[in-house]
Amino acid sequence: MARARQIALVLGLAFQAAGCDIVQGFQHAGDALFPPVETYLDVPGYRITGGHFRYLDMITSTEPYILARSATDGDDTLFLMHFNAPVPCAIPNVARYFTGAGANTKRTYVAFFDASDSDILHFSDVDCAPLDFTLEHANLPIGYSPTGLVIQVGPDLFDVNPGAGSSKLLASSLEAFDAQRHLVRAGGRIGVFDSNWALVRWVGDAVVGWASAFGSTFFEDKGGIQRLTITDSNGTRTASTLTLAPDACDLTILPQAPHLQLIGYHAPCAEMTATVWDAQTHRASALPFAPNLGRLKLFGSSKDSHPDFTTDPYFAVYLTDLDADGDTGTLHLRALDGSDLALGGGAALERVDLATAANNDDYDGGFALLDVDGETGRFVHFDFDGNVSDIATGVVRRPAEPAWTRLVIAVSDQLNDLAEVVDGQVVTVAHDVPNNRYAYAPRAGNSPLSGQLAWFHDLHGDLGTLSLASPNPSSGLLDDQGHEALYKATPVAQDVYVNGHGFMVDLPGFVYFAAWDEKNGTGRLDYSNQELGFSATVSDGVSDYLQPGSGLLYTVPFGSAAGIWLARGK
């Protein structure tokens, strides 16, 4: 089964995250379909088109469109339909694809690789009219312009107009690009483009590295370490550069710590003097020791301090004696008085953090992951005298879900526990969570359930328990890492399908699959409203769903109800 949820889905999620209605501005659709405040869904809704579909996508350009795949095994047809007049048209034999457009786009295209000749990029419009124009040795587009799509072809980047069969060279000898910021690195320079992929200017000379952080892009070229600042004002983009150090090399973005945003480099380069530049104060400070900049993290003397590294005391943690991959090493702590303490080997720097006592901003020790072997290690606490105490083994080094900032402890290759640390001891708060999608927050910042997490736990086979979790002050216990009340989970539903659950965008609750049929890839789609305390079934035989800003758009691939359905918010 060849398919890809390309930028169309990303755009859909971006609109969810922003709390926007995808048909905002289209009053003829928005007022009729999406009322402004919802407390429940009008289920099962109504079938907007019949047919055997799976794998919904959605794009918003000058008009909103629905995309779907055929539910027939071996059929690589891609279907498109206008959201407000959903009559499907078909593009046959589509493998990977990209579609999307901006507000200024004159025509929306679908770029795709044919399932039978995946080296050739084909094009269609959203009415499924095939275009004669094709590109060999091309990648899927990285974005779009008012006239077409931005595509890498071989080593070069082009603004391609598939309808006119024309292309405009944007950059040759492409080395890297940042599609989100519209930056291109090519021929030893950095090209700055505006939102329409019109060139603003080229900067740099023999650029050897770049990185974006703290609202700017930093780069290293033969003129030293530079900062690129991009400003968008009244529809116009400008770009300016500032030399941070003329004789400098080894540009490094240091891990962010409380109140600190630091750029690292060696200056003078020949002397390899470790230097940090503060992105907030714009001051550069040479460090009195020689750490590996890529394995260094700096802290102020307390959680609320912002030190001048030339004159003020500070903490540093860094790695030496790196392993063969340069990934772990011996952990050192440089204390406020400049003394150096070796804390242990096999350390992962990204899991090292300093900690404060409850109700105190002064650091009194820290936590680290030592003896990392593959994906797990030994989680420890250390103090500023160099004493190290064990807390837990089998702690996952790179948890899949950043929303859960405490411990994930491996139980088996497929199962883990969620845990917190209280008085130096592990307290398990959720058992048998999967390797991913086990803890997540609402996408929209204005969600009624903001500040709470979804947990998926007690996994057995492909089914588990979906819960709403939040700190529980009545426990009377605070965790050692964040000094926050221990989390408590309130079950929402049991026997939920592991790969089908999420927060509702417009209701204070969840949408999830139950009674999952693995053979057919369908299940019963349910939803809940946590504030009103009820759950209801949307439909049986559902294969997937989207949340188009409000309500649910879902597919029923088989049977008399086959088609794409819309359950409106009420």
Image (cartoon, helix red, strand yellow):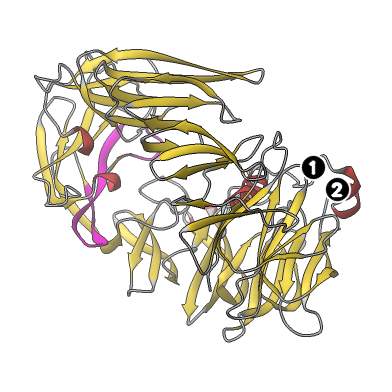
Quick check: 224 left or right of 187?
left
How crowded pointer 1 is (Cα within 10 Å; few <14, some 14-19, many 20+) is rated as few
Residues under numbered marks 2 and 1 in contact, where contact means CB atoms less than 8 Å apart: yes
Question: Quarter-wise, where is residue 232 in the image?
Answer: top right
Start-end of magenta stretch: 355-381
**SS label for mark 1:** loop
Q: Which mark is residue 83?
A: none
How crowded pointer 2 is (Cα within 10 Å; few <14, some 14-19, many 20+) is rated as some
| Residue 356 lies within the magenta run | yes
Q: Where residue 423 appears, x then y in whole percent?
A: 32, 53
Q: Where residue 295 appears, x then y in whole percent?
A: 21, 39
Quick check: 339 left or right of 400?
left
**SS label for mark 2:** helix
Which residue is located at x 16 percent, y 34 percent?
292
**Residue pointed to by mark 1:** 24
Q: Residue 30 carries which label?
A: 2
> Is residue 260 visible from the viewing direction of this image?
no
Q: In this view, does 467 lie above or below 165?
A: below
- Amino acid on which the number 1 mark rests in the picture: Gln
Which SS type dominates the magenta stretch? strand
